[in-house]
Image: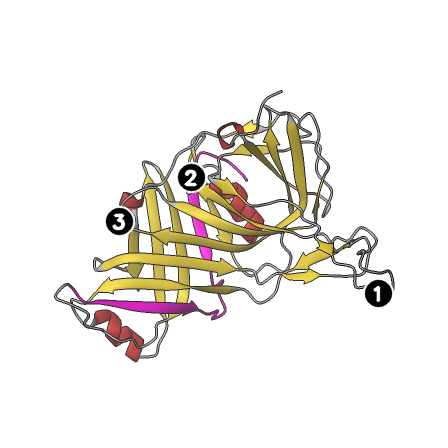
Amino acid sequence: MGRARGATAQMLVSIEGTYGTPPASGYNKVPFISSQLGAEQPLIDSELLGLGRAPADPTYDVVTNDGDVVVPLDANNLGVWLKLLLGAAVDSVVTAGSVFQHVFSSGADSLPSASIEVGHPSVPSFQTSYGARANIFRIGMQRSGNTSATLGLIAKGETAPANASAAGSPTLLPIVRFAAATGAIKIDGVQVGEIVSADISFSNALEKIETIRPDGEIADADPGMPMANGSLTAKFSDNALFNKATAKTPVSLEFSWTAGAYSLKIVIARAFLPKVKRPVTGPGGIQQDFNFQGSTGGAPMFVATLVNAVASH
């Protein structure tokens, strides 16, 4: 028996057929950077009087299992998380037998849930968070370095620790990371060269169904009004972005990354840019920050197109 370390931790994910019921198979072994997922059940201090200065026992409150999972922007494995976030994709063939396209769109009436097992084989200890739904998805863009995505998850509960994995024989997909250096941003279809950083965020605005039940868990988490927003930090070199903001008309934003034949493209078709300041704080270059908000105009507000080696997610 050894000690648990992050270096030996593993994460397995499977889409559930029934909400809150861990599947017996169909798991993907996915790369991850960090995980805050796991059930908690806090204690409530006793408020009883009349027993002298000796406090009575605390009681247990409800179970919560919310947390962020940070994953690499990886061509093959990201599809697992996009399916959880947006629902099933529309799949098509790019190159027969080797390259496939998957289009994930926001706005589905119902969204899938997943069971996520986090294992520590060196202990051994394996626990599965079940009924996990994806609430928030965030990506930060910069000029260099590795690129990752943060998923804010809301789960129903977690199994007791087991000595062996319950995931059967998981699928391990090849890891193909999208580097920050391959990132590109287009506004209204035109490549923009003065953006120094960007943040993209999407939320399903999940609402916890917190019914009274003996297990202390939530009944479910229903999708609310989706939101897409973020920010663009641009060097002030012309009035192009400023003019688009002051025109008060929506623009199309496209964020993309490539890795050989594979790619990821995120499109927010209708985004509104605010009028912003251009503060002068020193002798260096002047930057302007545009905090955009997405809107729906009859088409999906947030569309992620993933091209990879997986026929279907």
The residue tagged 3 is 143
Residue of label 1 = 49
In three-dimensional space, the C-alpha distance between marks 3 and 2, rounded to whole angstroms, equals 17 Å
Crowding near the residue tagged with mark 3, few <14, some 14–19, many ≥20 C-alpha atoms within 10 Å: some
Q: Nearer the viewer, mark 3 or mark 2?
A: 3
Which mark is on residue 100?
Answer: none
- Is 247 included in the stretch rendered in magenta? no
Q: Nearer the viewer, mark 3 or mark 1?
A: 1
Q: What is the C-alpha distance between the residues marked 2 and 1?
A: 57 Å
**Mark 3 touches mark 2? (CB < 8 Å):** no
Up-down relation of residue 241 to residue 60 (above or below): below
For image coordinates 74% across by 57% down, the residue present is 44
Q: Quadrant of the N terminus?
A: top right
Q: What amino acid does circle 1 point to? A: Leu
Residue 306, magenta (yes or no):
yes
Q: Position of residue 310 (x, y in %)?
A: 49, 35
Helix, strand or loop status at disc 3: loop
Q: Specify how the rendered protein is coloured.
A: secondary structure
Type of amino acid at the residue the image marks with label 2? Asp
Nearer-the-camera pick, 49 or 195: 49
At label 1, counting other C-alpha atoms closer than 10 Å, the crowd grade (few under 14, some 14-19, many 20 or more) is few
Q: Which residues are magenta?
A: 285-313
Left or right of residue 216, residue 188 in this image = left
Q: Residue at x 33, y 58 (%)?
A: 198
